[in-house]
Image (tube, grey):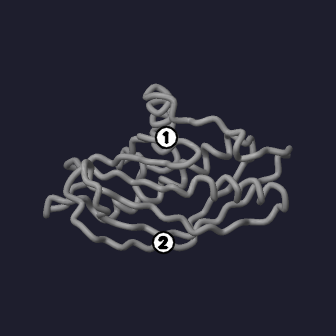
Amino acid sequence: MKTEINQMLPLDNGGRTLWKRTLELWVFTMIKSPMIFFVRPYITHLNDARTQILVKLNRKNKNPYGSMYFGSLTVGAEIVPGITVVTTSRQLNIPVSFLVKQFNGNYKLKANSDMVFVSADNAAIKQAIIDSSKDGCAKTLTITVNAYNKGSEEVSAIFVMDISLKAKNKE
């Protein structure tokens, strides 16, 4: 199956599609990964160029100092490429296994409000999925996710992770 990256349609076509994808994420994580469900990420932007989620600061994920727990920040950062991988593999009709191999966080500001996590590495993820389906080998990518306090343009944290993707056989 020959698929070009440029043939993809944008996924961010209004709130209805994003809300549906958020609900799908919650149902999946409620069953398969309760830690992610506990954080309740909202998908706020998803297209071929960028993925963005929102994690709301609430009593469940707020530490005694009024900021978001480290674990909630980590879940927010890790789920961004995960959403991109799942969505892209569905678009391409290529089943993919996904694994985080290395994770680094650089915290610059206190996470004292709702947090927005953004990654612009979607094209690289798509290309890795396509390449892996062609040659059958796992691909390792370095993905950067920036976290912002909601309403701020200043980066609160930078997460850099190495992810491994491998297309599965469609048997």
Q: Nearer the viewer, residue 57 or 141?
A: 141
Residue 7 image point, x, y percent: 72, 39
Rounded to the nearest angstrom, the CA distance separating label 1 from label 2 is 22 Å
Q: Residues within 10 Å of mark 1 (few under 14, many from 20)?
A: some
Residue 60 image point, x, y percent: 24, 50
Q: Quadrant of the N terminus?
A: top right
Q: Nearer the viewer, residue 83 or 45?
A: 45
Residue 26 image point, x, y percent: 45, 39
Residue at 51 percent across and 49 percent down: it is 50
Residue depth check, mark 1 versus mark 2: number of the one nearer the observer: 2
Residue at 76 percent across and 46 percent down: it is 4
Residue designated by label 1: 25
Q: Is residue 15 above or below residue 34?
A: above
Instruction: Determine whether the residue tagged by mark 1 lies in a helix, strand or loop.
Output: helix
Residue 100: image quadrant is bottom right
Q: Residue furthest left?
A: 65
Residue at 73 percent across and 42 percent down: it is 92
Left or right: 96 as drawn, with respect to 75: right
Which numbered circle lies on residue 103? Answer: 2
- Can residue 58 be seen? yes
Q: Type of residue at label 2?
A: Phe
Left or right: 166 as drawn, with respect to 119: right
